[in-house]
Image: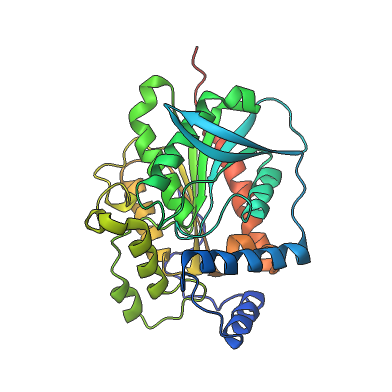
């Protein structure tokens, strides 16, 4: 199932409010996101996020609680968000933040997790997975699987509905959500099942040929082909030869049949748009229900810019409302 947007329609210009942000960053000669040491890159992100938070505030939810997700001897820090209407039996969404596997944290993506919780009226489990290069692949993938299995096993205690547990992720987090969905497919007989997956501007191919992206001569603000090379290098580390396999690249998984129904959100001004479309097409060919939302006037990290751009807020709202309905539609059958 696709949305009404024609994936071959002419590219729309970047949203004016986002374009102003890009112009201001370029005028200030902002360095590339992964330049310098990881600590320096993370501090730049922290300052930017906190500045935005001071200006726009954060969405209000009912409760926030830090916890330690444990499964099979492994432990991962998580932050659990509950909506204001925290009645029993809500959908539960395990969320993986973006940041190229190098940047970001539960704290820095607090505003995104809060909005997902509020607008989906769902319990959100935001996962503080280990970051590269200190913890290269497969650390983030392993943490994602651990946290998701914990959430499934503890869904009733979290206040969630066992028939509506999903994974969701943005960018690198979209990779982790897709990878977790594939990994957990083999555990269905144990009752460890997912109802759906939400992949937002996902990076699903760590072996992507960035020269092909550069050959388009298009400007991709906020995520350049050079940034993509940095991400692959930093995340894969000594495992660079495995980049074209699954994991870490869901696009190269041998079989996608039997995966949870997917909502995929894509941005027009994003170098990852085409691989996101390619993944959607592979899911559809494998018989997986897919709903695509393409926002041709958005850049890659638009999900976090709902305070700064009315168009980004509308796109974020659309994703939240669509996935809430998708989870309701694709709830798992009740087993006894």
Of residues 291 and 57, the one drawn nearer to the viewer in this rendering: 57
Q: Residue at x 59, y 79 (%)?
A: 22
Name which quarter of the figure residue 7 lies in. Answer: bottom left
Q: Is residue 124 visible?
A: yes
Q: Residue 192: x, y in percent?
A: 44, 26
**Figure colour scheme:** rainbow
Look at 49% across and 69% down and name the residue there.
268
In this rendering, is residue 264 above or below 52?
above
At horizontal 31% and vertical 47% (from top left) the residue drawn is 247
The residue depicted at 49 percent of the width and 46 percent of the height is 129
In the displayed structure, would residue 231 be above or below residue 291? below
Q: Position of residue 310 (x, y in %)?
A: 70, 67
Residue 328 visible in the shown view: no
Q: Which image quadrant is residue 132 in?
A: bottom left
- In the displayed structure, does residue 87 sit left or right of residue 16? right
Relative side of 259 to 255, left or right:
right
């Amino acid at each position: 199932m696709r949305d009404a947007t024609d994936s071959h329609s002419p590219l729309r210009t970047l949203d004016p409010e986002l374009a102003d942000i890009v112009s201001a960053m370029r005028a200030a000669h902002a360095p590339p996101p992964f330049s310098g040491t990881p600590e320096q890159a993370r501090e730049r992100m922290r300052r930017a996020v906190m500045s935005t938070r001071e200006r726009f505030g954060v969405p209000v939810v009912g409760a926030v609680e830090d916890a330690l997700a444990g499964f099979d001897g492994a432990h991962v820090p998580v932050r659990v968000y509950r909506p204001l209407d925290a009645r029993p039996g809500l959908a539960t969404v395990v969320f993986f933040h973006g940041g190229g596997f190098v940047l970001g944290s539960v704290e820095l993506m607090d505003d995104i997790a809060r909005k997902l919780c509020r607008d989906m009226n769902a319990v959100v489990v935001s996962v503080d997975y280990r970051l590269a290069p200190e913890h290269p692949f497969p650390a983030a993938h392993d943490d994602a699987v651990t946290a998701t299995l914990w959430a499934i096993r503890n869904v009733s205690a979290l206040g969630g509905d066992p028939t509506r547990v999903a994974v969701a992720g943005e960018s690198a987090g979209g990779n982790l959500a897709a990878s977790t969905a594939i990994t957990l497919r083999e555990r269905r007989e144990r009752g460890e099942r997912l109802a759906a997956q939400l992949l937002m501007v996902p990076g699903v191919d760590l072996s992507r040929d960035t020269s092909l992206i550069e050959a388009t001569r298009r400007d991709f603000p906020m995520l350049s082909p050079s940034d993509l090379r940095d991400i692959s290098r930093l995340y894969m580390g000594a495992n660079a030869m495995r980049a074209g396999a699954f994991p870490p690249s869901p696009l190269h998984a041998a079989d996608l049949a039997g995966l949870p129904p997917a909502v995929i959100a894509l941005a027009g001004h994003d170098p990852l748009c085409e691989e996101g479309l390619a993944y959607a097409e592979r899911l559809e060919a494998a018989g997986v229900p897919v709903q695509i939302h393409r926002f041709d006037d958005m850049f890659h990290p638009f999900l976090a810019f709902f305070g700064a751009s009315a168009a980004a807020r509308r796109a974020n709202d659309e994703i939240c409302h669509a996935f809430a309905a998708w989870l309701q539609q694709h709830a798992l059958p009740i087993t006894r």
